[in-house]
Amino acid sequence: MRLVDSHAHLQSDAFAADWQHVLDSARLAGVERLLVPGWDLQSSRAGLGLAQSAGVDASAGIHPHVASGADDESWAGIVDLADDPAVVAIGETGLDYDRGFSPRAAQLVNLRRHLRLGRALGKPVILHCRSKPGARDAQDDLLRELEAAGAGTSAWPTSGGRPPALLHSFSGPVDYGRTAIDMGLAVSFSGLVFRRGEEISRQVARLVPADRLLAETDSPYLSPPGAPRRRNEPEWVRVTIDWLAQARGQSPAAVGEQLVASYDLAFGRG
């Protein structure tokens, strides 16, 4: 079965000793496409290094957790990296009102920078979005920022059908997902869908057009059932893809084919 992992932090300390073995195992399992997203300047540089040496894809960005510590010099470094052809997306960025490691004002400034950069370069913006349990304020703020940036309108031109942004590791209410889909965003699902309180993701998974559907591990985090709890790895994306197949009433093989095509479309690999 063909597999993709659209979000795996192979440059993190968790894989420092054996990232090549982990990547080889993923490829043996059928993972044909893999994106290594950055979360700050150092990790974005490391991700680009992996892209250049190991045949994966990279993104460059600053996570909302570290938004308050990202100075202008760090942002200038991200902008420089973003021009590299191996950097196929901008981010990971977004809003996290759950843990709140950075003030909301700093997160919003950080998000707006990424949206402007993604729009200017025609590269999709990878969006993290979390609210506290039972809340949706981060999702609502994210939609407002996307609307203000022109996502889904002629103010944000896209080429070749690429989405302006993608919701990474989807979490949120159905109407939030539906609005993002209407804006033309891609939606990616991870092992988070197996956690209590995330059951509604199954409804959203049915709504996503095939050409904007993605799957991921968010390695080394969010291990799905059956995967080692200590460290998730890209090969375990197959568990989430099986879940997607069940949710959409398709065979895993058919979903796998769709995922490769949508990955290539989103990240300009076609």
Image: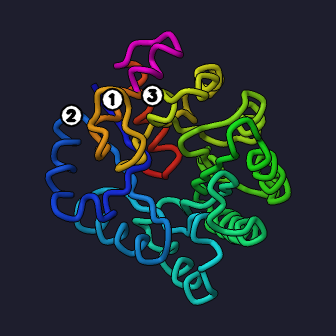
Q: CA distance from mark 1 to mark 3?
A: 14 Å
- Is 243 inside the magenta-drawn segment? yes
Q: Which residue is mark 1?
A: 238
Left or right: where does residue 116 sit relative to residue 47? Answer: right
Is most of the magenta stretch helix, strand or loop? helix
- The kind of residue on which mark 3 rests is Gln
The answer to whether residue 168 of the structure is visible from this angle is yes
Task: Tell me which segment is drawn in magenta.
Answer: 241-253
- The kind of residue on which mark 1 rests is Arg
- Is 258 inside the magenta-drawn segment? no
Q: Farthest residue to the bottom: give it.
A: 73
Mark 1 or mark 3, whichever is nearer to me: 1
Q: Residue at x 76, y 52 (%)?
A: 142
Question: Residue 29 shows which numbered tag?
Answer: 2
Determine whether label 2 and label 1 are within 8 Å by CB: yes
Q: CA distance from mark 2 to mark 1?
A: 8 Å
Determine whether label 2 and label 3 are within 8 Å by CB: no
Question: Residue 258 shows which numbered tag?
Answer: 3
Question: Residue 179 shows which numbered tag?
Answer: none
Q: Secondary structure at mark 3?
A: helix
Q: Earlier in the sequence, mark 2 or mark 3?
A: 2
Check disc 2: other Cα within 10 Å, few if <14, some if 14-19, many if 20+: some
Q: Residue at x 44, y 21 (%)?
A: 243
